[in-house]
Image (cartoon, rainbow, N blue to C red):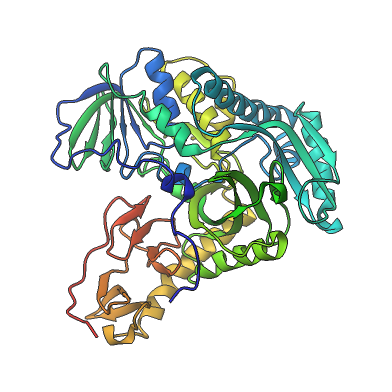
Amino acid sequence: MSNLTGKHISYWIDSTDSGQFVTPESISLDGIAVDVVIVGAGITGLTTAWLLKKVGKTVAVLEANQVAGAASGHTTAKVTSLHQLIYADLINNLGQEKAQIYADSNQAGVKWIADLVEAENIDCDYKSIDVYTFAESDADLKKIEEEYEAAVRLGLPASFVKETTLPFPIAGAVKFSHQGEFHPRKYLLHLAQKISGEGSFLFEKVRVESIEEGQPCQVKTGNGTILAGDVIVTTNIPSVEKGLFFAKASAQRSYIVAAKIDPTQAPQGAYIGVGEGYRSLRTTPFQDGLLLLIGGEGHKVGTVNDTEACYQKLEAYGRSRFGITNFDFRWSNQDMKSYDKLPFIGKATDSSDHLYVATGYDLWGMSKGTMAAMILTDLVRGYANPWAELYTATRSTPFITPGSIKNNTETAVHWIGDRLQALQNTSFNDVGRGEAKRLTIDGKQVAAYRDEQGEIHAVSAVCTHLGCVVNWNNGEKSWDCPCHGARFSCEGKVLQGPAVKDLEGISSMARV
């Protein structure tokens, strides 16, 4: 039994209405035709839809779950171009010209959000703040100094500081001024409310099963087929096999705990550390005070079984650094990290004329997702975009990097080793209450979870994406694929792509 405290839900979702866009199960989408279908209703999908509709395009946004309920509803929501440590690395590896494009495009994303909030008076707790990347030890200080120097070379609003409002000393930090933070779901629900009407649509609970590119494109869902001139896939990881994006990036999970804090004790601005066990920090309005968000403990999807320990470590940090005794919320998130540290934005393949993607934001989706929408809008309209070439989704990526080698080696190990491990357990009786195990039953790989009432939930342990074996995630009560990041509920329902099909159910009468 877990000893974690607080609601197990994102604060952003808990504090907003989740029922305003629900699509009736009986609705048929057959016969609908639009200029552009957008798959995914997160920051990229909704911003793209908003921009396209503004220029007269008709759109249909298809969301498998709930609007702004995936990565965009579980982020820390820092609206910033300071992405921990990136600029020194980009200059060294890609040159100053490409690093400048990265800086300019992300700054443009930050400004676009701030300008829209002001222009439309969006009630989303937006606040202009300073954002910091900090080092606590002298051993990590050189990285901070190099990042500061690189940022200055690129004309970014950077300064180097040794004093902050954190309640502990630091060795140094790079500070970006005129950045932002907000309530991401309030912001995105405002955009979502502008989509439907005048030949445009937004549908929740509609999962895309396949996309056939052509003239027109055919987007097949469980509710029928929509026709479109162009299709843009903006899900966390593209649910289309074209482009092999699941192999070009690594799926990463991260964790957040949140606790009420006295405003006089709260740090001003938003922070992220560097080095081993770094933490992410920001506050947001909550009740009559502030909620402190503490993030960290990231890892590759499906490689950590005891994810409750990730939350426990973050809570321990909150107690030791901020004197927090009670935690109000906890949640986790998932994002894709490309091996060259740049997102993939643009046509899905070299042969694609009408299929576009956006993915690989590496935990910084507010600025990247917004600038991706700006790029995609131009591309669909046939306009040149000055940033598009840097992020082109069909670019040659360095598959042979330390990160890609490690990821592909781990994939091979899981492919073989996880199958052998399941041979050790052959009966549902091996699974205790509150436990989950992989079993071999009648020659089949079975993923079994016994809930606290004693009921067994048994599904195939073979991921429906490419056949890897899933691992248990005790903090989320989910089965996670360590190969390419697909996740499933204990009942086998798809929670996260690239898989689009549920795990096969396994019959069991076991109850003890």
> In the drawing, does residue 27 fall left or right of residue 410?
left
Q: Which residue occupies 40% across, 33% down? A: 189
Tell me residue 178's x, y (percent).
Answer: 70, 29
Number of marks: 0
Seen from this angle, which residue lies furthest top? 56
Question: Would you identify the image quadrant in which residue 129 lies?
Answer: top right
Task: Decide: is 423 above or below 357.
Answer: below
Q: Quadrant of the N terminus?
A: bottom left
Question: Would you identify the image quadrant in which residue 415 lies?
Answer: bottom left
> In the drawing, does residue 135 fall left or right of residue 189?
right
Q: Nearer the viewer, residue 269 or 251?
A: 269
Residue 427 in view of the camera: no
> In the drawing, does residue 177 fall left or right of residue 382?
right
Residue 429 in view of the camera: yes
Q: Which residue occupies 14% across, 34% down? A: 28
Q: Quadrant of the C terminus?
A: bottom left
Tell me residue 33's x, y (percent).
Answer: 22, 23
Seen from this angle, which residue lies furthest front? 288
Q: Which residue occupies 50% across, 56% down? A: 329
Tell me residue 432's x, y (percent).
Answer: 34, 83
Q: Nearer the viewer, residue 151 or 410?
A: 151
Tell me residue 315's x, y (percent).
Answer: 60, 64
Task: Decide: is 31 above or below 364.
Answer: above
